[in-house]
Protein backbone atom coordinates (compact mmCIF):
# COMPACT_ATOMS: atom_id res chain seq x y z
CA UNK A 1 0.00 0.00 0.00
CA UNK A 2 1.48 3.39 -0.94
CA UNK A 3 1.67 6.01 1.79
CA UNK A 4 1.29 9.74 1.10
CA UNK A 5 2.81 12.31 3.45
CA UNK A 6 3.06 16.08 3.70
CA UNK A 7 6.64 17.24 4.07
CA UNK A 8 6.34 20.62 5.75
CA UNK A 9 8.84 23.44 5.28
CA UNK A 10 10.83 25.17 8.03
CA UNK A 11 12.01 28.71 8.55
CA UNK A 12 15.02 29.76 10.61
CA UNK A 13 14.27 32.31 13.31
CA UNK A 14 17.82 33.50 13.79
CA UNK A 15 20.88 31.64 12.56
CA UNK A 16 24.28 32.30 14.06
CA UNK A 17 27.33 30.89 12.25
CA UNK A 18 30.20 29.87 14.52
CA UNK A 19 33.58 28.26 14.03
CA UNK A 20 34.63 26.41 10.88
CA UNK A 21 35.29 22.86 12.08
CA UNK A 22 37.92 20.38 10.97
CA UNK A 23 35.22 18.22 9.32
CA UNK A 24 34.30 21.04 6.91
CA UNK A 25 31.12 22.06 8.76
CA UNK A 26 30.44 25.18 10.82
CA UNK A 27 29.10 25.33 14.35
CA UNK A 28 25.58 26.72 14.25
CA UNK A 29 22.96 28.02 16.63
CA UNK A 30 19.48 28.40 15.20
CA UNK A 31 15.78 28.21 16.01
CA UNK A 32 13.81 26.25 13.45
CA UNK A 33 10.05 26.63 13.07
CA UNK A 34 7.88 24.41 10.88
CA UNK A 35 5.32 26.21 8.68
CA UNK A 36 2.28 25.19 6.65
CA UNK A 37 3.80 25.19 3.14
CA UNK A 38 4.62 21.65 2.12
CA UNK A 39 5.49 19.17 -0.60
CA UNK A 40 3.68 15.86 -0.93
CA UNK A 41 5.73 12.65 -0.89
CA UNK A 42 4.26 9.29 -1.89
CA UNK A 43 6.21 6.20 -0.91
CA UNK A 44 5.59 2.68 -2.10
CA UNK A 45 7.57 -0.53 -2.32
CA UNK A 46 7.49 -2.09 -5.75
CA UNK A 47 9.23 -4.93 -7.51
CA UNK A 48 11.94 -2.99 -9.34
CA UNK A 49 15.52 -2.66 -8.32
CA UNK A 50 17.39 0.41 -7.28
CA UNK A 51 15.93 3.75 -6.36
CA UNK A 52 13.52 5.72 -8.47
CA UNK A 53 12.69 9.35 -7.73
CA UNK A 54 9.92 10.98 -9.72
CA UNK A 55 9.40 14.72 -9.77
CA UNK A 56 7.95 16.97 -12.45
CA UNK A 57 10.28 19.83 -11.46
CA UNK A 58 13.41 19.35 -13.60
CA UNK A 59 15.61 21.16 -11.06
CA UNK A 60 15.09 18.44 -8.43
CA UNK A 61 17.81 15.83 -8.94
CA UNK A 62 16.42 12.32 -9.35
CA UNK A 63 19.73 10.49 -8.91
CA UNK A 64 22.02 9.88 -5.95
CA UNK A 65 22.33 13.64 -5.34
CA UNK A 66 18.74 13.72 -4.07
CA UNK A 67 18.62 13.33 -0.28
CA UNK A 68 15.71 10.87 -0.56
CA UNK A 69 17.95 8.62 -2.64
CA UNK A 70 20.35 8.38 0.25
CA UNK A 71 17.68 7.28 2.69
CA UNK A 72 16.25 4.26 0.95
CA UNK A 73 16.87 1.46 -1.53
CA UNK A 74 14.25 -0.46 -3.43
CA UNK A 75 11.49 2.08 -3.14
CA UNK A 76 9.47 4.27 -5.45
CA UNK A 77 9.17 7.82 -4.19
CA UNK A 78 7.04 10.41 -5.93
CA UNK A 79 7.62 14.03 -4.94
CA UNK A 80 4.96 16.62 -5.67
CA UNK A 81 7.16 19.72 -5.55
CA UNK A 82 5.55 22.87 -4.21
CA UNK A 83 8.37 24.26 -2.10
CA UNK A 84 11.17 26.18 -3.81
CA UNK A 85 14.31 24.25 -4.72
CA UNK A 86 17.44 25.56 -2.90
CA UNK A 87 15.08 27.94 -1.11
CA UNK A 88 16.25 27.72 2.52
CA UNK A 89 12.94 26.14 3.56
CA UNK A 90 14.47 22.70 4.05
CA UNK A 91 12.39 21.18 1.22
CA UNK A 92 14.86 18.45 0.25
CA UNK A 93 15.49 17.62 3.92
CA UNK A 94 11.78 17.43 4.72
CA UNK A 95 11.26 15.19 1.67
CA UNK A 96 13.94 12.82 2.92
CA UNK A 97 12.45 12.59 6.42
CA UNK A 98 8.97 11.99 4.95
CA UNK A 99 10.52 9.22 2.87
CA UNK A 100 11.90 7.53 5.96
CA UNK A 101 8.63 7.91 7.89
CA UNK A 102 6.66 6.74 4.85
CA UNK A 103 8.86 3.67 4.50
CA UNK A 104 8.35 2.81 8.15
CA UNK A 105 4.62 3.01 7.53
CA UNK A 106 4.71 0.96 4.31
CA UNK A 107 6.92 -1.72 5.86
CA UNK A 108 5.01 -1.61 9.16
CA UNK A 109 8.31 -1.29 10.98
CA UNK A 110 9.23 1.44 13.40
CA UNK A 111 12.85 2.41 13.89
CA UNK A 112 13.97 3.32 17.40
CA UNK A 113 14.12 7.13 17.80
CA UNK A 114 17.91 7.17 18.16
CA UNK A 115 18.31 5.13 14.97
CA UNK A 116 16.04 7.47 13.00
CA UNK A 117 18.01 10.46 14.23
CA UNK A 118 21.34 8.87 13.38
CA UNK A 119 20.26 7.98 9.84
CA UNK A 120 18.80 11.37 8.99
CA UNK A 121 21.67 13.34 10.59
CA UNK A 122 24.08 11.42 8.35
CA UNK A 123 22.17 12.58 5.29
CA UNK A 124 22.15 16.29 6.19
CA UNK A 125 22.30 18.86 8.97
CA UNK A 126 18.74 20.10 8.73
CA UNK A 127 16.92 16.79 8.48
CA UNK A 128 16.63 15.96 12.22
CA UNK A 129 14.41 18.98 12.97
CA UNK A 130 11.72 17.30 10.87
CA UNK A 131 11.65 14.40 13.36
CA UNK A 132 10.38 16.91 15.95
CA UNK A 133 8.41 19.65 14.18
CA UNK A 134 7.13 22.85 15.83
CA UNK A 135 9.69 25.20 17.41
CA UNK A 136 13.10 23.52 17.59
CA UNK A 137 16.55 24.56 18.79
CA UNK A 138 19.36 23.44 16.46
CA UNK A 139 22.98 23.28 17.64
CA UNK A 140 26.18 21.51 16.58
CA UNK A 141 26.12 21.69 12.78
CA UNK A 142 22.34 22.15 13.11
CA UNK A 143 21.66 18.43 13.43
CA UNK A 144 21.40 18.31 17.24
CA UNK A 145 17.80 19.25 17.90
CA UNK A 146 15.83 20.04 21.03
CA UNK A 147 12.13 20.90 21.24
CA UNK A 148 11.53 24.45 22.46
CA UNK A 149 8.34 25.84 23.99
CA UNK A 150 6.04 26.56 21.06
CA UNK A 151 5.86 30.10 19.77
CA UNK A 152 2.33 31.45 19.31
CA UNK A 153 1.15 30.22 15.88
CA UNK A 154 1.65 33.43 13.93
CA UNK A 155 0.59 34.09 10.37
CA UNK A 156 3.47 34.11 7.97
CA UNK A 157 4.14 35.40 4.45
CA UNK A 158 6.81 33.65 2.42
CA UNK A 159 8.46 35.38 -0.55
CA UNK A 160 10.34 33.16 -2.98
CA UNK A 161 12.49 35.09 -5.47
CA UNK A 162 13.48 32.95 -8.43
CA UNK A 163 17.08 32.48 -7.31
CA UNK A 164 18.81 29.35 -5.98
CA UNK A 165 21.42 29.96 -3.29
CA UNK A 166 24.03 27.24 -2.72
CA UNK A 167 24.49 26.65 1.04
CA UNK A 168 28.16 25.48 0.88
CA UNK A 169 29.00 28.54 -1.27
CA UNK A 170 27.28 30.85 1.22
CA UNK A 171 29.29 29.32 4.08
CA UNK A 172 32.53 29.70 2.08
CA UNK A 173 31.66 33.33 1.37
CA UNK A 174 31.02 33.92 5.07
CA UNK A 175 34.51 32.57 5.88
CA UNK A 176 36.14 34.78 3.23
CA UNK A 177 34.25 37.83 4.47
CA UNK A 178 35.21 37.28 8.12
CA UNK A 179 38.88 36.75 7.16
CA UNK A 180 38.83 39.92 5.02
CA UNK A 181 37.28 41.93 7.88
CA UNK A 182 40.07 40.84 10.19
CA UNK A 183 42.75 41.63 7.59
CA UNK A 184 41.34 45.10 7.03
CA UNK A 185 41.32 45.61 10.79
CA UNK A 186 45.10 45.21 10.56
CA UNK A 187 45.37 41.72 12.02
CA UNK A 188 48.41 39.79 10.77
CA UNK A 189 47.49 36.96 8.35
CA UNK A 190 48.88 34.21 10.58
CA UNK A 191 46.56 35.24 13.39
CA UNK A 192 43.44 35.31 11.23
CA UNK A 193 42.17 31.73 11.72
CA UNK A 194 42.42 31.87 15.52
CA UNK A 195 40.86 35.30 15.70
CA UNK A 196 38.03 34.25 13.39
CA UNK A 197 37.34 31.31 15.67
CA UNK A 198 37.43 33.44 18.82
CA UNK A 199 35.12 36.07 17.38
CA UNK A 200 32.54 33.70 15.96
CA UNK A 201 32.50 31.70 19.21
CA UNK A 202 31.78 34.91 21.09
CA UNK A 203 28.82 35.56 18.84
CA UNK A 204 27.41 32.07 19.40
CA UNK A 205 27.82 32.50 23.18
CA UNK A 206 26.02 35.83 23.03
CA UNK A 207 23.01 34.40 21.20
CA UNK A 208 23.18 31.30 23.42
CA UNK A 209 22.89 33.53 26.51
CA UNK A 210 19.97 35.40 24.92
CA UNK A 211 18.18 32.12 24.18
CA UNK A 212 18.87 30.78 27.69
CA UNK A 213 17.39 33.96 29.16
CA UNK A 214 14.38 33.56 26.86
CA UNK A 215 13.90 29.95 27.98
CA UNK A 216 14.26 30.74 31.65
CA UNK A 217 11.63 33.48 31.27
CA UNK A 218 9.29 30.90 29.71
CA UNK A 219 9.77 28.44 32.53
CA UNK A 220 10.55 30.64 35.52
CA UNK A 221 8.16 30.30 38.40
CA UNK A 222 9.54 33.46 40.03
CA UNK A 223 6.68 35.70 41.20
CA UNK A 224 8.30 38.82 39.75
CA UNK A 225 9.53 40.14 36.40
CA UNK A 226 7.87 39.73 33.02
CA UNK A 227 7.46 35.95 33.31
CA UNK A 228 5.10 34.50 30.72
CA UNK A 229 3.16 37.71 30.16
CA UNK A 230 5.31 39.02 27.29
CA UNK A 231 4.81 37.83 23.72
CA UNK A 232 7.45 35.04 23.47
CA UNK A 233 8.27 36.05 19.89
CA UNK A 234 9.12 39.62 20.87
CA UNK A 235 11.25 38.24 23.70
CA UNK A 236 13.01 35.99 21.19
CA UNK A 237 13.71 38.94 18.89
CA UNK A 238 15.11 40.79 21.88
CA UNK A 239 17.37 37.78 22.54
CA UNK A 240 19.18 38.85 19.36
CA UNK A 241 17.90 36.49 16.68
CA UNK A 242 19.22 37.41 13.27
CA UNK A 243 20.31 35.39 10.29
CA UNK A 244 24.08 35.72 9.63
CA UNK A 245 23.64 34.57 6.03
CA UNK A 246 21.97 37.90 5.22
CA UNK A 247 25.42 39.51 5.45
CA UNK A 248 26.76 37.50 2.52
CA UNK A 249 23.64 36.68 0.54
CA UNK A 250 22.10 40.18 0.34
CA UNK A 251 25.16 41.80 -1.29
CA UNK A 252 25.31 38.96 -3.84
CA UNK A 253 21.55 39.01 -4.61
CA UNK A 254 20.30 42.55 -3.86
CA UNK A 255 16.69 41.62 -4.71
CA UNK A 256 16.62 39.41 -1.60
CA UNK A 257 17.37 42.39 0.65
CA UNK A 258 14.71 44.32 -1.25
CA UNK A 259 12.19 41.52 -0.64
CA UNK A 260 12.89 41.69 3.11
CA UNK A 261 12.37 45.46 3.08
CA UNK A 262 9.13 44.96 1.11
CA UNK A 263 7.86 42.49 3.75
CA UNK A 264 8.58 44.98 6.52
CA UNK A 265 6.88 47.78 4.56
CA UNK A 266 3.87 45.48 4.11
CA UNK A 267 3.52 45.31 7.91
CA UNK A 268 5.62 42.30 9.00
CA UNK A 269 6.46 42.41 12.73
CA UNK A 270 9.64 40.49 11.96
CA UNK A 271 11.20 39.55 8.61
CA UNK A 272 14.27 37.51 7.72
CA UNK A 273 16.03 35.33 5.20
CA UNK A 274 15.42 31.63 5.92
CA UNK A 275 18.53 29.44 6.05
CA UNK A 276 20.91 30.54 3.31
CA UNK A 277 17.92 31.66 1.21
CA UNK A 278 16.65 32.51 -1.24
CA UNK A 279 13.33 32.51 0.65
CA UNK A 280 12.37 35.43 2.89
CA UNK A 281 9.56 35.31 5.42
CA UNK A 282 7.62 37.85 7.43
CA UNK A 283 5.58 37.23 10.58
CA UNK A 284 2.24 38.97 10.96
CA UNK A 285 -0.15 39.67 13.83
CA UNK A 286 -3.18 38.08 12.13
CA UNK A 287 -4.20 35.96 9.14
CA UNK A 288 -5.99 39.02 7.71
CA UNK A 289 -2.84 41.14 7.88
CA UNK A 290 -0.84 38.36 6.19
CA UNK A 291 -3.38 38.01 3.37
CA UNK A 292 -3.45 41.78 2.83
CA UNK A 293 0.34 41.90 2.72
CA UNK A 294 0.39 39.00 0.24
CA UNK A 295 -1.92 40.87 -2.14
CA UNK A 296 0.18 44.02 -1.81
CA UNK A 297 3.46 42.17 -2.40
CA UNK A 298 2.07 40.33 -5.44
CA UNK A 299 0.97 43.64 -6.97
CA UNK A 300 4.58 44.76 -6.60
CA UNK A 301 5.71 41.67 -8.50
CA UNK A 302 6.90 39.49 -5.58
CA UNK A 303 6.04 35.76 -5.50
CA UNK A 304 4.35 35.84 -2.09
CA UNK A 305 2.32 33.17 -0.29
CA UNK A 306 0.47 33.37 3.02
CA UNK A 307 0.79 30.50 5.48
CA UNK A 308 1.13 30.01 9.24
CA UNK A 309 3.47 28.42 11.70
CA UNK A 310 2.76 24.73 12.30
CA UNK A 311 2.97 23.57 15.91
CA UNK A 312 4.47 20.21 16.88
CA UNK A 313 1.01 18.71 17.50
CA UNK A 314 -0.32 19.96 14.14
CA UNK A 315 2.82 18.76 12.37
CA UNK A 316 2.24 15.15 13.41
CA UNK A 317 -1.53 15.35 13.04
CA UNK A 318 -1.28 16.57 9.45
CA UNK A 319 1.72 14.46 8.37
CA UNK A 320 -0.25 11.66 6.71
CA UNK A 321 -2.42 12.83 3.81
O1 LIG B 1 24.60 19.06 6.18
P1 LIG B 1 24.41 19.39 4.73
O2 LIG B 1 24.76 18.26 3.83
O3 LIG B 1 23.07 19.97 4.44
O4 LIG B 1 25.46 20.55 4.41
C1 LIG B 1 25.78 20.93 3.10
C2 LIG B 1 27.08 21.70 3.13
O5 LIG B 1 26.88 22.95 3.79
C3 LIG B 1 28.22 21.04 3.87
O6 LIG B 1 28.95 20.18 3.06
C4 LIG B 1 29.04 22.22 4.32
O7 LIG B 1 29.85 22.70 3.25
C5 LIG B 1 27.99 23.28 4.58
N1 LIG B 1 27.60 23.32 6.00
C6 LIG B 1 28.48 23.90 6.91
N2 LIG B 1 28.10 23.95 8.23
C7 LIG B 1 26.90 23.47 8.63
C8 LIG B 1 26.00 22.90 7.72
C9 LIG B 1 26.39 22.84 6.40
O8 LIG B 1 29.57 24.36 6.55
N3 LIG B 1 26.57 23.57 9.92
Image: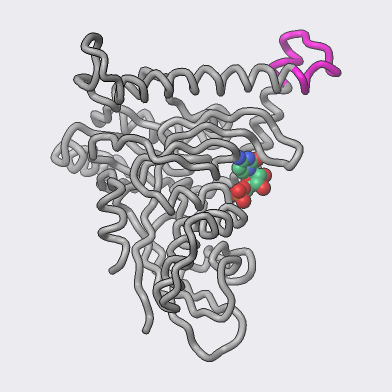
Residue lying at 54% horizontally and 66% vertically, measured from the top left: 68
In the foreground, 142 or 212: 212
Query: Does the magenta portion include 229?
Result: no
Is 261 left or right of 163, judged from the image as shown?
left
Q: Is residue 26 above or below residue 7?
A: above
> Which range is magenta?
180-194
Tell me residue 316's x, y (percent).
31, 57
Q: Is residue 81 above or below residue 11?
A: below
Check the picture and name the quadrant holding the C terminus: bottom left
Q: Is residue 270 above or below residue 224?
A: below
Residue lying at 36% horizontally and 55% vertically, measured from the top left: 8
Residue 101, quarter of picture: bottom left
Tell me residue 87's x, y (percent).
47, 49
Q: Is residue 267 above or below residue 126?
A: above
Tell me residue 55's x, y (percent).
47, 72
In the foreground, 256 or 89: 89
Amino acid sequence: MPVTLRSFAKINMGLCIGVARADGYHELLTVYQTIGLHDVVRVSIQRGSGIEIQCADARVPSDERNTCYQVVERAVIRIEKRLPVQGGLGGASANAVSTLLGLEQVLKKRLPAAERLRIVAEVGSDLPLFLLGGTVLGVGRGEQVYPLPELPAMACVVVTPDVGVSTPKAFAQWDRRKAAELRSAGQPMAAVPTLTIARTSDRISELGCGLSAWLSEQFSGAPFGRGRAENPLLALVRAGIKNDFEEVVFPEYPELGEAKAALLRAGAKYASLSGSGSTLYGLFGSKGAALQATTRLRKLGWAAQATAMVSRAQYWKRLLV
